[in-house]
Image (tube, rainbow, N blue to C red):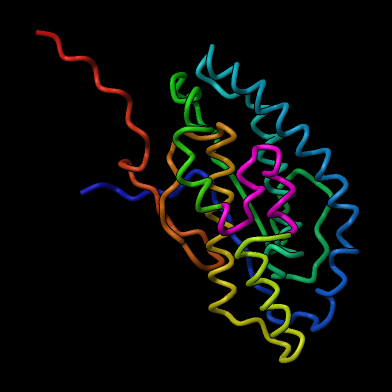
Amino acid sequence: MQNTTSYPLQLTGELAPRLSRGLWLVKWLLAIPHFIVLFFLWIAFAVVSVVAFFAILFTGRYPRGLFEFNVGVLRWSWRVGFYSYSALGTDRYPPFTLKNVSDYPARLEVEYPESLSRGLVLVKWWLLALPHYLVVAVFAGGAWAAWTGIGSQWMWSSGGLVGLLVLFAGVVLLFTGRYPQSLYEFVLGMNRWVFRVAAYAALMTDTYPPFRLDMGGNDPPTATASETVPPMPAPVTS
């Protein structure tokens, strides 16, 4: 029997017990400063990922400082998305920081890999991740599938199933003052899937994202050893 371990990326979100009925209507305006900062952070994220690509290719390691920066960008993005139109899970304004904020209701961590496959770095971000891109395009909108759209398309939910369901949750919240729990858990599962794919495509892990919708605010253990892409078998010689 295989041991089950946590996926290297852990995403959590604690739904606020009370949410404003109407604040979500103007969160697009309140979050504009974050959107501006994230625009430039995601440009830096792409540049850092290219540098990391060559570092992994030649050394088999992701430079620790670059890794922590990219984790910070993912973390910041998730906090803003959780506050705004990727979840509407809290009315608490997100902090302007790349660092972990332990008391904020949305958190994200990525386990640092001590070594990474030099061969996988050539194919995992485009070929191996392609099936996941198709799924994420449904969740977050087709433009996400383009590398340049990772941080801009789905994060403020301009399309896709996440945006549609969050809009529905906002309407329910407006009229009832309550966020449907089952809908929240489904939305969190989709966000978790998207971020796992983002981390894998950004070369931050060799562990293949599971094809499973892990719903709920807490991140359950999901990955098994079989979900890590195995090395190519050695050729058989006679």
- Res 28 → quadrant: bottom right
Q: Is 46 or 148 nearer to us in this picture?
A: 148
Q: Is residue 91 above or below residue 198?
A: below
Location of the C terminus (image quadrant): top left
Q: Is residue 144 above or below residue 180?
A: above
Q: Residue furthest top?
A: 238
Residue 168 within the segment the image draws in magenta:
no
Q: Position of residue 200 (x, y in %)?
A: 53, 38
Q: Residue furthest left?
A: 238
Q: Residue at x 70, y 74 (%)?
A: 167
| Region in magenta | 137-157
Labels in figure, total: 0
Please give left or right for residue 5 compared with residue 3 in the image. Answer: right
Q: Residue at x 52, y 68 (%)?
A: 216
Please give left or right for residue 224 compared with residue 124 in the image. Answer: left
Please give left or right for residue 188 compared with residue 148 in the image. Answer: left
Q: Position of residue 139 (x, y in %)?
A: 57, 59
Q: Is residue 81 above or below residue 166?
A: above
Q: Residue at x 55, y 19 (%)?
A: 56
Q: Residue at x 55, y 52 (%)?
A: 136
Q: Position of residue 138 (x, y in %)?
A: 56, 58
